[in-house]
Image (cartoon, coloured by chain):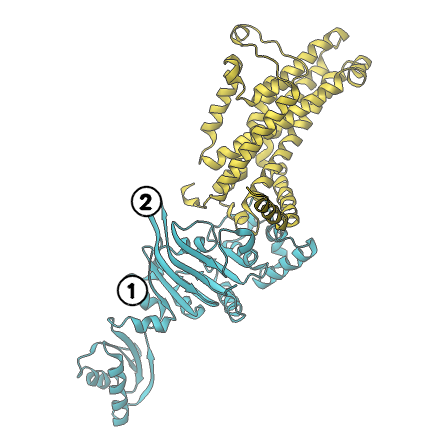
Chain colours: A yellow, B cyan
Amino acid sequence: MTQEQLQTAIGNLRRQPWSLWALQARRLTQIEIRRNLISRRGLWIYFLAFIPAIIIGIHLLVDRHPDFAMSDDTVVLAGVVQLYYVRLGIFFGCLGIFSRLIRGEMVERSLHFHLLSPVRREVILLSKFLAGGFSAVAVFGTAIIVDFTLMYAGYGGAGQEFVFHGPGLGQLASYLLITVLACLGYGSIFLLLSLVFRNPMPGAMLLLGWEAINPVLPSLLQKFSVASYLRHLMPVSVPAEGIFALLTVETEPVPAWAAVLGLIALIAAVLVFSCYRIRRLEISYTSE
Amino acid sequence: MTDTIQFENVSKFYGEVLGVNRISLTISPGITTLVGPNGSGKTTLMNLMTGLVQPSSGTVSVLGMNPSIASDVFFQVGYCTQFDSFPRGITGLQFILDGLMLFGTSKDEAAHLAYEAIERVQLAQEAAHRKIAGYSKGMRQKIRLAQALAHHPRVLVLDEPLNGLDPMARAESIALFQELGRLGMCLVISSHILDEVDRISDRVVLITGGYLIAQGQIQEVRREVRDKPMQVLIRCNNPELLAARMFSVNHCVEARLHDDGHGVFLRTGDIDQFYRLLNEIAVEGLVNIEAVAPADDNANAIYQYLIGSDGSAS
């Protein structure tokens, strides 16, 4: 590309109505967040997110909390995040939220209202993705904060010391970062699956299976997994036990920045392809 | 920027299934009605002109714009689809506001436009604050119409807009369409209710099996159908004598007395010769002719001639 062509391209980009697109994106995102968070159909996602909080809350009420048990509970909380939230809770929650954004609206025959508005389809898709991401992070992030609070609330002064003067808050920040990346990573994949397939469920189940067997795969294949990158961000390692420990292949640790950048690159690539797909999307509700 | 909608040799296939085939059509401002049986391609034409589907070949332009570029087209175009579905859990007002907010208008301006549209379709303000899930079919039709015209489009595409409306609401809607047409808006309407097509339309587009059969003003289209005998109703004091005189020439193929006995329906294969003979009979003074009116230059008759079935039944 010559310098003149480059300048023309930059000039064209500058002439685009970016402020209108930003306004449309903000308003579409608000509309979608309202639909995602204030919906009776979304109740099961709240249930999915807060099951651990309920269980930890019951333990808080009925169990004694001697100081020496705190390190065990720290591992338990890490296990809850890594094995429950990342592999199940956030996975299925995002499946529910993100596959509804496009495919759900096609099933309900209401997607055309968006497509008949003066909004670029890429803006519609990215706004929906942002709204889905915000909704999922709001629900699961809140749930993890509640889990964390309830987990250490029973330890009194020792718990406060751990949280405010020890590694507690750092661990919570890591869990929240994992939650954000998991929501956006799985969310982008489910959004794409719902654009490509009439029924995104088989694809989602394949992904679930892939994520489940990923720890026992060779280290090269482990790189193609959302959960694998997230595992490298865990502040507390969860030991594999029993037969699972025998099958697990230990991989070289990936630096946190590389894991984060890797996931962001994955999300960006999936969104670019999703934008390409939505430009070619045709409304044919009769086949839904 | 032109003020027409143009199809140039447009075909659309859904896999192996034909949607429309080699359609070339220009739709000018005013009211144009698409007429055809179910599955004839009316909705495909509407979806093509609003970018919901892309042509397999040929080009479509709306006011000189490519309909697939939503950010240009939908400032000027409103489309009321036939899909009787809405986003869940919202009120009629919220439904219109959500759409308007994407035009970049302020909240106050959006609210003003929303209330104006609700008033225009004559939906009660109180109903607009209720959830759409509790609306009757007619109210849902009205709120969709309000949403399509709230931003003051220059082109309004309406897929079966009279479905589900009671006679009063239907008359109100027709009056609204006629008013919008008079204001220079380009209205494209699909309808099965052929009697009303006559009242609404400036032009008709007849389509069947994905093929364009005829287009133009109803009377023009009728005149083009030269091979089909035309029917004329003549109100007079002696219909039997008139019918006998008319049958003395060979272009008259059918006569049927009016129910009240004061008129006769005559079908002729040569309308020009028919009117000349009728003038002669009137001059002779044997029959006192009160009124002469074409009885089949309406959409229903043309539909039957060209498509071969009664459109009202489909």
The answer to whether B94 appears left or right of B235 in the picture is right
Q: How many other residues sit within 10 Å of disc 2, few (<14), some (14-19) or many (≥20)?
A: few
Q: Nearer the viewer, residue A169 or A201?
A: A169
Q: How many marks?
A: 2
Q: Is residue B282 above or below residue B162?
A: below
Q: Is the residue under label 2 in contact with that under label 1 (CB below 8 Å)? A: no
Residue under label 1: B306
Q: Quadrant of residue A42?
A: top right
Q: Secondary structure at mark 2?
A: loop
Chain containing the residue with disc 1:
B
The label number, if any, that marks residue B16 in the structure image: 2
- Asked if residue A190 shows in the view, the reply is yes
- Asked if residue B35 shows in the view, the reply is no
Q: Residue at x 69, y 28 (%)?
A: A142
Which residue reaches farthest bottom?
B284
Q: Secondary structure at mark 1?
A: helix
Q: Nearer the viewer, residue A169 or B305?
A: A169
Q: Amino acid at mark 2?
A: Glu
Q: Quadrant of residue B119?
A: bottom right
Q: Position of residue B192 (x, y in %)?
A: 39, 60
In 3D space, how far apart are the residues under numbered discs 1 and 2 (Cα atoms)? 26 Å
Q: Is residue A45 above or below residue B177?
A: above
The label number, if any, that marks residue B124 in the structure image: none
Eye-nearest disc, 1 or 2: 2
Q: How many other residues sit within 10 Å of disc 1, few (<14), some (14-19) or many (≥20)?
A: some
Q: Amino acid at mark 1?
A: Leu
Q: Residue at x 39, y 56 (%)?
A: B42
**Which of marks 2 and 1 precedes in the sequence?**
2
Q: Nearer the viewer, residue B168 or A155?
A: A155
Q: Position of residue B246 (x, y in %)?
A: 21, 83
